[in-house]
Amino acid sequence: MKKAQGNTVIRNGSLFDGTGSPPVPDACLHIKEGRVAYAGPAAQAPAPAPDAAVIDARGGTILPGLIEAHYHATYFNVAELADLDIKYPVEYVTLLAAANAKLALECGYTSARSCGSLHNIDVWLKKAIENDLHPGPRMASAGREICGSGGLMDWNPDYLKLGMEGLILLVNGPVESRAAVRKLAKDGVEWVKTYPSGDAASPHADHHSTCMTREELDAAVAEAHNFRLKVTGHCRSTAGIKNALLAGFDAIEHATFIDDETLDLLLQRNVPVVPALYFEKASIERGKEFGMPQRVIDGHKETLEGGVESARRILKAGGRLGMGGDYGFAWTPHGDYAKELTFFVKDVGFSATDTLRCATKTGAEILGREKELGTLEPGKLADVLVVDGDPLRDISILEDRSRFIAVLQGGIVKAGRRA
């Protein structure tokens, strides 16, 4: 991805740099050749270059670009699970994914971690973005997901004679688990998404069930790490979370029903979690509009309650949380990503400061790019969001794209009023 040439100064705003330092009320940010050169009080800033471009924050806030840590670019208006694999042909899904990536960038998300993709679209979408063929977040790619046969993602009954090859690699036993990872490695993914547990949406593998054996998970992790890939998984049940951690997962999605023993294990291994909770709330509030059975809605009520409590416990214990969610469903459309942040402040009880750090600094750590992204410090890539207003006082302003003065990647304005 290209970086800006020359110099840019962003001034007349408060600075939230994502490091944990207090906000700087009268700050400026200097960008040189696409990287942060200075971030701090305006009174202590070096003189700007005579030819520097100037962005006026208009008394708003300068903060790191947001990071969507649980991204499904290929999901689009999904109303039932079958929509994920058979609703559209791969050619159309590719175009939808490109549109979703552009929208994510316009929403202030300058980076994203794929958490599963139809076919191998995200790998090539990432290449298109990196080569400046199409706008979108910097991506960490995933591909098809791995699930045990009969598990959450194996929902088509055999009599329909419909495969799941575009979305899922179904496995039986550790040998097939290794083979699935090898296919993904050949496809060029960075992350391997698995299903240690089920979900309320499944008619047969609910949120207290396991969908893969410990042996299957061990094999997947060993093979992925052999290829220097990272592994994450859909973990709601206590057993699913524990099995994933013992297998050596690099991240956990949801961690809904974490108990004391599993929390201790999570902290010992310093594994980050992406709770992805707003999807549960939206499912409860809007599921009936889209024909969601009451049984499933009741299940989402249980997973929401458990997920909120788990997120609170993990943060309080000093664990690491990223921000992201299952957007691309009919009741959680693409573009609503920042509702996750609002939910964590208003419903879960996180401070806006903690929530934004999860959505920036920790997000970069999950991507494995904390040396380049996630905070506004000298030497890092100038991925920046300039907002008209103060999200530390009202985080919901991040839901309103009209408040974005500028969204920058590598110092180049890609979206916002200045685009």
Image: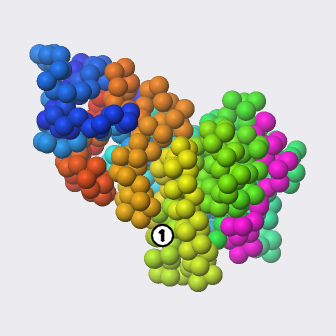
- Give the x, y percent position of residue 159: 80, 75
Q: Nearer the viewer, residue 303 or 196?
A: 303
User: Taking 395 as reference, is 125 left or right?
Assistant: right
Q: Nearer the viewer, residue 361 or 1?
A: 361
Magenta residues (range)? 201-223
Q: Nearer the viewer, residue 115 or 280?
A: 280
**Amino acid bearing label 1:** Lys
Q: Is residue 135 visible?
A: no
Quarter of the figure that contains the N terminus: top left
Q: Residue at x 28, y 49 (%)?
A: 392
Residue 215 drawn in magenta: yes
Above-or-below relation of 372 to 200: above
Quarter of the figure that contains the C terminus: top left
* Label 1 environment density (alpha carbons within 10 Å; few <14, some 14–19, many ≥20): many
- Give the x, y percent position of residue 74: 53, 54
Q: Nearer the viewer, residue 51 or 61?
A: 61
User: Taking 134 as reference, is 231 left or right?
Assistant: right
Above-or-below relation of 51 to 352: above
Q: Secondary structure at mark 1?
A: helix
User: Taking 348 as reference, is 145 left or right?
Assistant: right
User: Taking 16 as reference, is 162 left or right?
Assistant: right
Q: Residue at x 70, y 70 (%)?
A: 206
Q: Which residue is mark 1?
A: 281
Above-or-below relation of 182 to 205: above
- Give the x, y percent position of residue 374: 41, 34
Residue 185 drawn in magenta: no
Q: Residue 9 appears in which quarter of the rendering?
A: top left
Q: Residue at x 26, y 22 (%)?
A: 38
